[in-house]
């Protein structure tokens, strides 16, 4: 549809351009209100010749832009192109000279007189050369600019497709990585608190429903992402009970903005993964604020000796993934600040709404 629209627009621009040039001699032609028959003939001669000149030059313009430039200049080189162009101009000069002679004898000297025709013909030769070179220059500029625009458009399309593919791959990583961690939690919980497995599985089904049915779109309302975060935090509360202090604050304006689905969960998941264990009074602070101008997401957790233990192969996939997604989705309107000390780890994500 985009290409079709571009083609129609291009056609209309060309049509307007040539119609304007064809009408120009009529609009700017000599004043033919004189009663002098010679003035009237000269006026008709000028309008006829200049209009015919423009009409005949249309094939020359497209011959240069559609055949000579793409087929000869790029394929055969500059020398072959220039020789062909000069030969074509010479042929066009001959044709225009014949046209000039025919028009001159029919409008200026209809009685067949020959005197004085050499001067106008010699004077018109330089004008014809200049105008043909002008059409050649305009055609060359048009073709080079048009080709450059098409190349840039193709590069942009290729880059967009590459980024979409990469983003799709990154999003596909989130669910398996998340499920891997949650199922590990369920296995651990089944050993320590088997009676809690059922409510955990119910919460897990709610999370899976969101992951499967709500994340097909490129963006989702912040309210849906908030509900997803709340379900995940509730699941962790069931799992850990009173062993960990979880503070989740959120403030969303009356007009909810949108966000890439499952963009915030890796930060929360990382906090629960590394903020529990051999830690005294483990605490996780989560705060989400969304206004008309920006979204701010802050997550902080305490650290313990467990963060120095060997990690599994999937460890860190979530954070590396979300950082890359932020670069692709919000390249110039986000900031991610990570602060880490021996005892604490926190991130602050800010996304400006545009």
Image (cartoon, helix red, strand yellow):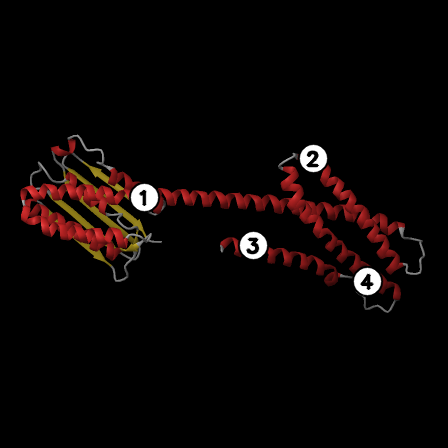
Task: Tell me the mark number nearer the camera, choosing from 1 and 2.
Answer: 2
Ranked by sequence position, the earlier of labels 2 and 3 is: 3
| Viewport quadrant of the C terminus | bottom left
Q: How would you rate the neighbour count of disc 1 (Cα within 10 Å): few for under 14, some for 14-19, many for 20 or more?
A: many
Which mark, residue 44?
4
Q: Residue at x 80, y 49 (%)?
A: 95
State the image quarter where residue 303 is shown. Answer: top left
Q: Is residue 349 above or below residue 291?
A: above
The alpha-carbon separation of the residues under discs 1 and 3 comes to 35 Å
The residue that disc 2 covers is 80
Which mark, residue 308?
none
The alpha-carbon separation of the residues under discs 1 and 2 comes to 50 Å
Are the two marked residues, 1 and 3, in contact with CB atoms closer than 8 angstroms? no
The alpha-carbon separation of the residues under discs 3 and 4 comes to 37 Å
Task: Tell me the mark number nearer the camera, choosing from 3 and 4.
Answer: 3
Which mark, residue 325?
1
Residue 160: where, in percent of width, then height? Answer: 42, 45
The residue that disc 3 covers is 7
Ranked by sequence position, the earlier of labels 3 and 4 is: 3
């Amino acid at each position: 549809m985009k290409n079709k629209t571009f083609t129609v627009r291009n056609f209309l621009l060309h049509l307007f351009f040539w119609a304007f040039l064809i009408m120009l001699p009529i609009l700017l032609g000599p004043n033919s209100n004189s009663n002098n028959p010679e003035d009237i003939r000269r006026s008709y001669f000028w309008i006829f010749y200049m209009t015919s000149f423009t009409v005949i030059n249309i094939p020359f313009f497209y011959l240069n832009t559609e055949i000579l430039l793409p087929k000869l200049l790029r394929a055969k080189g500059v020398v072959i192109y220039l020789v062909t162009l000069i030969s074509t101009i010479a042929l066009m000069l001959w044709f225009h000279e014949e046209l000039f002679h025919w028009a001159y004898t029919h409008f200026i000297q209809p009685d067949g007189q020959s005197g004085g025709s050499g001067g106008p013909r010699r004077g018109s030769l330089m004008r014809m050369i200049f105008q043909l070179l002008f059409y050649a220059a305009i055609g060359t500029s048009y073709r080079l600019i048009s080709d450059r625009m098409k190349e840039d458009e193709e590069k942009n399309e290729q880059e967009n497709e590459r980024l979409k593919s990469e983003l799709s791959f990154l999003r596909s990583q989130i669910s398996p990585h998340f499920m891997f961690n949650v199922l590990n939690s369920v296995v651990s919980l089944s050993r320590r608190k088997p009676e809690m497995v059922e409510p955990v599985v119910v919460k897990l089904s709610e999370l899976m429903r969101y992951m499967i049915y709500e994340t097909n779109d490129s963006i989702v309302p912040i309210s849906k992402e908030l509900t997803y975060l709340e379900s995940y935090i509730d699941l962790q509360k069931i799992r850990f009970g009173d062993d960990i202090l979880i503070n989740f604050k959120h403030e969303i304006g009356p007009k909810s903005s949108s966000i890439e689905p499952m963009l915030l969960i890796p930060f929360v998941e990382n906090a629960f993964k590394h903020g529990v264990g051999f830690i005294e009074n483990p605490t996780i602070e989560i705060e989400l604020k969304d206004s008309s101008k920006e979204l701010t997401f802050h997550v902080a957790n305490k650290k313990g000796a467990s963060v120095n233990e060997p990690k599994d192969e999937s460890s860190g996939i979530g954070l590396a993934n979300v950082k890359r997604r932020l670069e692709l989705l919000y390249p110039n309107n986000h900031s991610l600040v990570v602060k880490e000390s021996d005892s604490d780890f926190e991130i602050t994500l800010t996304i400006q709404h545009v």
